[in-house]
């Protein structure tokens, strides 16, 4: 079986990071897993993407990063005709438009597409007008895409309701954001080192509107003590505005913007509490990494899966989306080191690449079998030879 994954490039993002990890794992287990990239730049080229061969358009026009989705729609069909995959993997909601357009452009020549739902479909953060058109767009996806994957059990009902497909067209595969080796490394005892008096808060995120990091900074300003610190790993378009906000709030000396770093999850064990303030998510990989590192977690209730992910609050504190006062109160009362290490380890181990990659392949085999199986109506219509 040949599985083609398509991505915009190596720009940092949770969807792309996990897709690259899946490609690497599939290849290691003998799966023919070509990778198409619309462009080749991005920090993950020397990180999780290092050493992966890929297919990319021969020519690239200047500025395609600003219209990368249109660029992929224009260039991917030719690659599909050349590579001739048996099935295609749509790595997240960001790529759904490309998947739908492929179906329209290639028609019957388009291979089946398995699409991961990587973000919340309810989008209660958006206006009613946006939600109206978004629901229509989800139904179009349901008509075009062959099979959907949710990342945690509550997402099955979310996908069935939002996309308008039968439960048979939805698989639940715990998001393979971790590996057994990574979990073991994060759990290894570290040598004691001098530490500051205050609590060490941390987040890993793109500095983009979805992550609502302004709320995090305001919550930290309102709930932290004078010795507490906050470190932000990640980069993005909102960085200048967030740095200015930290200065306005009077916390710039306690907030460290570290930018993009390779494997930030490997640094989590150096911190006490992980923060997530997003408007919406699916199953945030950073939460899984926090569970693997066994550090405290404070997060907004930004998807249907968050309660299940944190076991109804047993593995972390959930606050309402957009509630600055609740976020500040959670920070004020946070007690590092009180989480149950056994339970966080058990939960983290559900989300490993070792289990997830194989599960994806089983689902894809099932999609191909159903596509090639004769329909019941065809069997009924099959002529029966007369008896001699």
Image: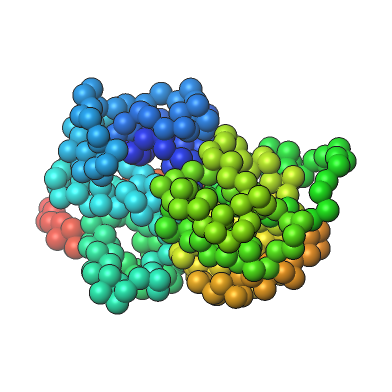
Residue 43, x across and y down, in percent: 46, 32
Residue 31 seen in render: no
Residue 52, x across and y down, in percent: 45, 25
Residue 93 seen in render: yes
**In the picture provided, is 316 more to the left or to the right than 368?**
right
Pick the quarter of the image with the N terminus: top left
The residue nearer to you, when weighing 232 against 85, is 232
Residue 228, x across and y down, in percent: 73, 56
The residue nearer to you, when weighing 384 against 219, is 219
Residue 180, x across and y down, in percent: 67, 41
**In the picture provided, is 241 more to the left or to the right than 370?**
right
Residue at 57%, 36% in the rendered image: 261
Q: Quadrant of residue 39?
A: top left
Q: Quadrant of residue 68?
A: top left
The residue nearer to you, when weighing 268 against 310, is 268
Residue at 41%, 47% in the rendered image: 237
Q: Quadrant of residue 209?
A: bottom left
**In the picture provided, is 14 more to the left or to the right than 187?**
left
Badge count: 0
Residue at 15%, 50% in the rendered image: 104
Residue at 59%, 41% in the rendered image: 258
Color theme of the render: rainbow
């Amino acid at each position: 079986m040949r599985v083609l994954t398509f991505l915009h490039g190596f720009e940092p993002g949770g969807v792309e990071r996990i897709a690259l990890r899946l490609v690497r794992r599939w290849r290691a287990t003998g799966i023919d897993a070509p990778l198409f990239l619309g462009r080749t730049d991005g920090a993950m080229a020397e990180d999780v993407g290092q050493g992966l061969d890929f297919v990319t358009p021969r020519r690239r026009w200047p500025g395609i990063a600003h219209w990368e989705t249109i660029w992929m729609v224009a260039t991917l069909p030719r690659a599909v005709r050349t590579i001739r995959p048996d099935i295609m993997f749509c790595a997240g909601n960001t790529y759904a438009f490309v998947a739908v357009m492929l179906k329209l452009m290639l028609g019957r020549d388009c291979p089946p597409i398995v699409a991961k739902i990587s973000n919340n479909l309810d989008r209660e953060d958006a206006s009613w007008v946006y939600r109206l058109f978004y629901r229509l767009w989800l139904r179009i996806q349901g008509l075009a895409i062959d099979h959907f994957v949710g990342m945690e059990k509550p997402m099955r009902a979310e996908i069935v309701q939002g996309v308008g497909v039968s439960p048979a067209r939805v698989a639940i595969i715990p998001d393979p954001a971790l590996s057994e080796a990574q979990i073991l490394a994060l759990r290894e005892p570290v040598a004691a080192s001098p530490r500051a008096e205050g609590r060490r808060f941390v987040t890993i995120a793109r500095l983009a509107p979805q992550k609502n990091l302004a709320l995090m900074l305001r919550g930290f300003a309102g709930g932290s003590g004078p010795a507490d610190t906050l470190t932000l790993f990640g980069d993005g378009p909102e960085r200048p505005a967030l740095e200015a906000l930290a200065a306005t709030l009077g916390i710039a000396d306690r907030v460290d913007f570290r930018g993009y770093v390779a494997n930030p999850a490997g640094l989590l064990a150096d911190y006490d509490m992980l923060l997530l303030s997003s408007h919406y998510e699916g199953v945030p990989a950073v939460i899984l990494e926090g569970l693997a590192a066994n550090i405290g977690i404070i997060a907004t209730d930004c998807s249907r899966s968050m309660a299940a992910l944190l076991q109804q609050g047993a593995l972390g504190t959930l606050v309402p989306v957009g509630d600055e006062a609740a976020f500040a109160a959670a920070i004020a009362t946070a007690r590092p080191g009180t989480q149950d290490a056994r339970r966080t380890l058990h939960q983290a181990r559900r989300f490993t690449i070792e289990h997830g990659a194989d599960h994806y392949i089983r689902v894809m085999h099932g999609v191909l079998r159903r596509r090639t199986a004769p329909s019941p109506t065809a069997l009924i219509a099959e002529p029966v030879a007369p008896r001699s």
